[in-house]
């Protein structure tokens, strides 16, 4: 692989074009409504391109490919859940229609109207915290993709991260949602082109039969049954359904597309049209992960045991070899030399019932899975085409940063800082506050990405940090709309209990599985909301509650 002058020219030209187009829109931003929801003038096709571009970045391809590498075809169930949920939300207008009709700009804004200002602030704090933790691992993971595929030395990872964030920061801070809507068209085209190139290379150079064979051979009988694989089972499936309903309705960067639509019907059409594209958002990079497994496993030679060596001694020897040689081989992309040893350690740990060695083998496989796809791309895609792929990846990444910067900064400025000030800011004051928040958020992300070590697969970490607030947010909104007795006390309990269960997963010492943590968050949040509301019932106006119960 050689990322040459032509590749760099294509990549840098696409980035320059994105920034230039984004900056052109800044003159049209005069009010906070222009900045956050594009003056509520978004159409169906612009909204679809904007939503898809924002919710697909390098991070998406990385964690979905890792999930496919680890779980095989079982991972595809997430894509099926996504398309069903997104289509259902689009057809029914569940939650997004009433919020759009109320003309809110952020999700917690409804909570003040329905419950109290303090509930809004609590929700805003948890959304800002969970969203920042979620976004906080994007740069370091995406920088690994860039260093592998372009050949940038690893010592420049921090600078690579800073450059990505700065590009997104510049035009988002100046142009807001208008910049996103305009630039997302270009980003969507580049993203689609890059996706098609990599997918075609996987199918032509590796092939579907080799991918299927790799799952059969290297996943020890797993890879086809989502209810049994990765130890997550039905609890994980249930949690994914609940989480994706919340993602399509109360995840701020997603909900802002409904808030920006010219009317509620347009918002519903955006989600209906996006559902099919969201299926590809999951399944395509997962297939790349499976292809990477087939690519490197096909080059590997089995790890041969030493004659006469007992299993316990062999396990200790393989573990010691990996302790000293794993990192250099990983950094060189020699994954075909690592996979047989990790698989051998897994089998020996299972036979000897050694849980510490089994955990170590799983952790090593997860690390391999994180970088397998970019190393495969660097090996398969020729020069010129690789530059086009990189242009698409970077366009997707910048779009994701921009959308998330705007979403979380809106929550911090509009739902935390402004209510705590106790006075109404001027339109220019709101704009300045939101822009300052974007800069502060960027600084936090840089630091967090460098100091935090993700427990388990990145997909699980991202889902759990989102679950910190999505379970209680969706429950308080749904019951607030359709249950008049829902009260502020219930909302407080809902957010506190729901967030506590998700935080438990992020503390490795507790040993809580991802499926258990996810469902526990929903269960405790619902219990807190119902119990608190029965203890101290609330009363909602017709404008904020639609039920009569």
Image: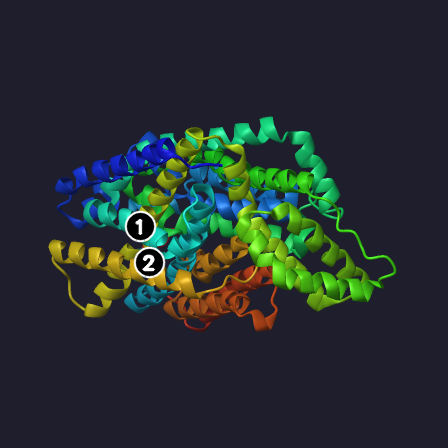
How many numbered discs sit on the rendered protein?
A: 2
Foreground pick, 32 / 2: 2
The answer, for residue 270, to whether it is visible in the render is no
**Quadrant position of the C terminus in the picture:** bottom left
Residue receiving disc 1: 163
**Alpha carbons under labels 2 and 1: distance apart:** 32 Å
Secondary structure of the residue carrying tag 2 is helix
Does residue 276 appear in this view? yes
Q: Which element type, helix, strand or loop, lies under badge 1?
A: helix
Q: In the image, residue 278 lies at what x, y percent? A: 47, 38
Q: From what the image shows, is residue 5 above or below residue 450?
A: above
Q: How is the image coloured?
A: rainbow
- Residue at image point 58% right, 48% down: 67
Q: Is residue 105 left or right of residue 238?
A: left
Among the 4 quarters of the image, the one containing residue 452:
bottom left
Q: Are marks 2 and 1 in contact (CB under 8 Å)?
A: no
In the rendered view, tell whether residue 399 sits above or below residue 357.
above
Observer-nearest residue: 498 or 344?
A: 344
Residue 274 percent location from the top left of the image: 43, 35
Q: What residue is rendered at 48% in x and 65% in y?
A: 498
Give the farthest residue toward the right. 308
Closer to the eye: label 2 or 1: 1
Instruction: Find disc 2 in the rendering and name its residue.
Output: 108
Is tag 2's residue or tag 1's residue first in the polypeptide sequence? 2
């Amino acid at each position: 692989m050689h990322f040459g002058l032509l590749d760099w020219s294509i990549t840098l030209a696409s980035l320059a074009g994105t920034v230039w187009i984004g900056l052109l829109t800044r003159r049209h931003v005069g009010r906070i409504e222009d900045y956050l929801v594009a003056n509520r003038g978004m159409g169906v096709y612009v909204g679809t391109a904007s939503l898809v571009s924002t919710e697909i970045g390098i991070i998406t391809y990385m964690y979905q490919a890792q999930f496919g590498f680890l779980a095989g075809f079982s991972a595809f169930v997430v894509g099926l859940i996504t398309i069903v949920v997104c289509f259902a939300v689009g057809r029914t207008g569940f939650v997004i229609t009433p919020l759009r009709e109320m003309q809110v700009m952020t999700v917690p804004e409804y909570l003040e109207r329905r419950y109290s200002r303090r509930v809004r602030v609590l929700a805003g704090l948890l959304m800002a915290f969970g969203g920042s933790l979620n976004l906080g691992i994007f740069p370091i993971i995406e920088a690994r993709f860039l260093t592998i595929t372009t050949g940038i030395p690893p010592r420049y990872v921090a600078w690579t991260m800073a450059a990505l964030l700065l590009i997104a920061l510049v035009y988002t801070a100046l142009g807001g949602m208008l910049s996103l809507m305009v630039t997302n068209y270009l980003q969507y085209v580049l993203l689609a082109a890059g996706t098609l190139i990599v997918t075609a290379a996987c199918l032509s150079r590796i092939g579907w039969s080799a991918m299927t064979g790799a799952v059969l051979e290297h996943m020890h009988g797993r890879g086809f049954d989502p209810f049994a694989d990765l130890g997550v089972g039905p609890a994980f499936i249930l949690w994914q359904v609940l989480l994706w309903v919340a993602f399509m309705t109360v995840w701020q960067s997603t909900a802002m597309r409904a808030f920006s639509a010219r009317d509620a019907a347009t918002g519903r059409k955006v989600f209906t049209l996006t559902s099919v594209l969201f299926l590809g958002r999951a399944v395509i990079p997962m297939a790349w992960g499976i292809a990477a497994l087939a690519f490197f496993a096909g080059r590997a030679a089995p790890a041969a045991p030493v004659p006469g060596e007992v299993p316990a001694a062999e396990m200790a020897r393989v573990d010691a070899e990996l302790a000293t040689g794993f990192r250099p081989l990983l950094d060189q992309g020699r994954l075909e030399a690592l996979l047989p040893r990790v698989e051998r350690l897994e089998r020996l740990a299972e036979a000897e019932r050694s849980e510490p060695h089994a955990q170590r083998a799983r952790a090593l496989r997860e690390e391999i899975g994180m970088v397998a796809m970019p190393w495969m791309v660097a090996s398969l895609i020729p020069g010129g085409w690789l530059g086009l792929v990189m242009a698409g990846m970077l366009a997707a990444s910048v779009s994701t940063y921009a959308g998330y910067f705007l979403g979380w900064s809106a929550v911090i400025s509009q739902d935390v800082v402004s209510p705590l000030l106790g006075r109404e800011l001027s339109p220019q004051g709101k704009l300045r506050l939101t822009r300052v928040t974007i800069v502060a958020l960027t600084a936090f992300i840089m630091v967090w990405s460098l100091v935090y070590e993700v427990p388990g697969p990145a997909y699980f970490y991202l889902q759990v940090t989102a679950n910190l607030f999505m379970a209680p947010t969706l429950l308080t909104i749904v019951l607030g709309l359709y249950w008049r007795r829902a009260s502020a006390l219930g909302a407080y309990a809902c957010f506190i209990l729901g967030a506590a269960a998700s935080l438990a997963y992020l503390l490795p010492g507790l040993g809580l599985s991802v499926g258990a943590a996810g469902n526990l968050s929903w269960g405790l949040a619902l219990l807190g909301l119902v119990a608190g509301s029965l203890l101290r019932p609330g009363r909602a106006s017709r404008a904020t509650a639609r039920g009569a119960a």
